[in-house]
Image (cartoon, rainbow, N blue to C red):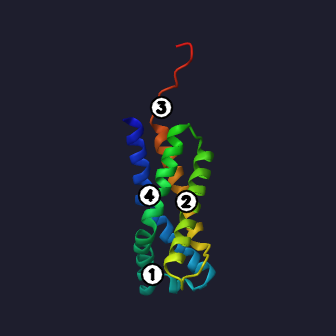
Amino acid sequence: MSQADAMKRTTFIFLALGPVIGGISIFVQFLVFDHPLALAELFSFGMIWMVIFFTIGGYVVGAVPAAVTGLLFSFVASRRALNLVESILLGAGAGFLTSAVAVVVIAAINPGAPKWNWIIPLAGALAGTLCSGLCRILEGKRSRLPAKNFHD
């Protein structure tokens, strides 16, 4: 039962934090690559609404990829013990792949959408990195039972 609980916790962490991190990451990439602004414009009323829009949009668009990333990560992490670097690389890879699949599905559903967009998979990789690092740190505090030796 403990393994199932750990998988539920991990998936919930990815589902709760992944879309927020992804939405804010997309907003930051939008600012950096498209609109270099003055500092006064960053704290304007319109920018506050943009942050709210990207955060809510992150949940609308990113909830399914975040949950799938959390399930993939928790499935692999439950099978073998991962150190922090392996956890981060696994989370980043799973986040990138699930977000890339989401971009392909959106392009298939909406023919007018761009066929490939690097912003969404990069946001998924960043969200997967941060969420998997957090999950590894939280799960590392819980002691794991040592594996039984052959002679035991």
Q: Which residue is mark 2?
A: 95
User: Could you tell me residue 92's position as x and y percent?
Assistant: 59, 57
User: Could you tell me residue 125's position as x and y percent?
Assistant: 58, 61
Query: What residue sits 52% from the left and 51% below the top?
Result: 132
Q: Counting other residues with Cα less than 10 Å from the Cα at mark 4, is it few (<14), some (14-19), or many (20 or more)? A: many
Q: CA distance from mark 1 to mark 2?
A: 24 Å
Q: Is residue 149 visible?
A: yes
* Dot in front, 3 or 2: 2
* 71, above or below 39, in the image: above
Sequence-first tag of 1 and 4: 1
Residue 4 position by quadrant: top left
Q: Secondary structure at mark 2?
A: helix
Discs 1, 3 touching: Cβ within 8 Å:
no
* 12, above or below 25, in the image: above
Query: What residue sits 46% from the left and 44% below the top?
Result: 138
Residue 67's label in the rendered image is 4
- Callout 2, which amino acid? Gly
- Callout 4, which amino acid? Ala
Residue 50's label in the rendered image is 1
* Dot in front, 1 or 4: 4
Sequence-first tag of 1 and 3: 1
User: Could you tell me residue 16's position as x and y percent?
Assistant: 40, 59
Q: CA distance from mark 3 to mark 2?
A: 26 Å
* Dot in front, 1 or 3: 3
Sequence-first tag of 1 and 2: 1
Query: What residue sits 44% from the left and 58% below the top?
Result: 67
Q: Counting other residues with Cα less than 10 Å from the Cα at mark 2, is it few (<14), some (14-19), or many (20 or more)? A: many
